[in-house]
Image (cartoon, rainbow, N blue to C red):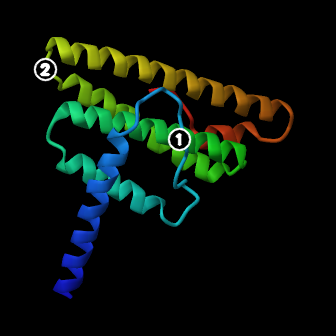
Amino acid sequence: MIRLGKRVSVFLIIILVFSNFAVYGQENTYDFGSAGITPDSALYNLELLIEGAQLAITIDPVTQTELLSDHLDERHAEMDAMLQQENYDALQTASQETQDTLENLHDTIETLPPTEENLEIIHETEEQMLIQEDHIEDINTELQTKVQSGALTEGLVQEIGITNV
């Protein structure tokens, strides 16, 4: 039983190391990119667990900010995918994860010491957060359009609960 735990630990460490290389090898262009594993997948909770583990072992708040920014982009891509597929239960999950990530990102940038470099990172991150919040408004508008056309009920839209932080 203990050997299985060690194997799982080694596997997770390998995933974390390689996923860090993949994350930092890409430039952030505010393109929400690919949704990757979406909330309607059985692997979604594993993805969130791995992302949480990445954050837990990351001590530097600047690196945490970069990770959370990447996670935020992915959460929004997931929202887009679920909206496009009209999977409103999964959209609700993606919406909640997006809001949680926005809050974590906001809390993390508040911990950055006010150096010149960090002020630039804070400014860029706040711009990204504004773009993301505009994106949430666009999704809300699309949902309201579906309500007006009769494709969705107002109650379901409220249940999905997409709001800006």
The answer to whether 23 appears left or right of 117 in the picture is right
Is residue 100 at all visible to an observer of this figure? no
Residue 136: x %, y % from top left: 57, 28
Residue 50: x %, y % from top left: 33, 57
Q: Quadrant of the N terminus?
A: bottom left
Front residue of 92/123: it is 123
Corner quadrant of residue 62 = top left
Residue 165: x %, y % from top left: 44, 27
Circle 2 residues within 10 Å: few <14, some 14–19, many ≥20: few
The residue sitting at 31% across, 33% down in the picture is 66
The residue sitting at 17% across, 11% down in the picture is 116
Marking on residue 95: 1
Q: Amino acid at mark 1?
A: Ser
The residue sitting at 28% across, 65% down in the picture is 12
How far apart are the two marked residues, 1 and 2, measured between alpha carbons?
Answer: 30 Å
SS class, disc 1: helix
Which residue is the extreme one toward the front? 25
Circle 1 residues within 10 Å: few <14, some 14–19, many ≥20: many
SS class, disc 2: loop
Q: Amino acid at mark 2?
A: Pro
In the picture of the structure, the residue carrying the numbered disc 2 is 113
Residue 15: x %, y % from top left: 31, 61
Circles 1 and 2, Cβ within 8 Å, touching? The answer is no
- Tell me which label, 1 or 2, sits earlier in the chain: 1
Q: Nearer the viewer, mark 1 or mark 2?
A: 2
Image: 13 above or below 23: below
Image: 81 above or below 109: below
The answer to whether 79 appears left or right of 22 in the picture is right
The answer to whether 150 appears left or right of 129 in the picture is right
Marking on residue 73: none
